[in-house]
Image: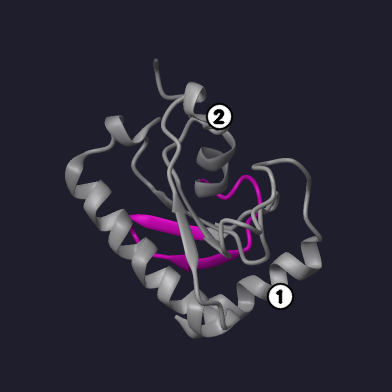
Amino acid sequence: MTYDDQNIFARILRGELPAFKVYEDDQVLAFMDVMPQAEGHTLVIPKTPAITLLDLDPEAAAYTIQVAQKVAKAMEKALDVKGIVLMQLSGAAAGQTVPHVHFHLIPTSVHELGKHAAQMGDMEKIKAIGEKIKAAL
């Protein structure tokens, strides 16, 4: 499968679509999921064009997970949560809905998770939670 540079995450990376960013550097972007499974659901994506984890260069994968850990620590602090689910879905058969590798950070317990990408969240609430996480970084 060829990388589609018109996927929603590629367009966010180019600034063509908005995102509630909580962290960004030259290699990685972390932003709020607008279809959250729980309050504070955050996505961490490499800027490298890769469809699945298996397509991602090992060094980019290692750096992306380091940023995911940093963001997760900020989430714990900012949102006063005791558990975070880290989820990475590789391929449509696994439930991947955007063809750009990404990591989900979901502050919750497995007993509270909503269905993935089931409904849009409250944008003002998502933005406010994102600002709290961003301030904790």
Q: Residue at x 29, y 30 (%)?
A: 55
Farthest residue, direction top = 1
Rendering colour mode:
one colour
Q: Name the image quarter holding the N terminus.
A: top left
Q: Amino acid at mark 1?
A: Ala
Please provide the residue range marked out in magenta: 14-30
Q: In this orientation, which residue lies closer to the viewer: 115 or 20? A: 115
Query: Residue under circle 1?
Result: 128
Mark pair 1, 2: CA separation:
28 Å
Around disc 1, counting alpha carbons within 10 Å, would you say few (fewer than 14), some (14 to 19), or many (20 or more)? few
| Disc number for residue 6 | 2
Query: Does residue 74 appear left or right of residue 6 in this picture?
Result: left
Check the image and report above or below for 6 versus 14.
above
Q: In this orientation, which residue lies closer to the viewer: 50 or 89? A: 89
Quarter of the rendering containing residue 63: bottom left
SS label for mark 2: loop
Q: Residue at x 45, y 35 (%)?
A: 100
Q: Residue at x 69, y 50 (%)?
A: 114
Q: Residue at x 18, y 43 (%)?
A: 58
Residue 116: percent from left, percent from top: 64, 42
Residue 136: percent from left, percent from top: 49, 84
Q: Amino acid at mark 2?
A: Gln
Query: Does residue 72 appear left or right of residue 36 in this picture?
Result: left
Is 16 within the magenta?
Answer: yes
Residue 12: percent from left, percent from top: 57, 47
| Disc number for residue 66 | none
Check the image and report above or below for 55 versus 1.
below
Q: Name the image quarter holding the C terminus.
A: bottom left
Residue 54: percent from left, percent from top: 28, 31
Between circles 1 and 2, the one closer to the viewer is: 1
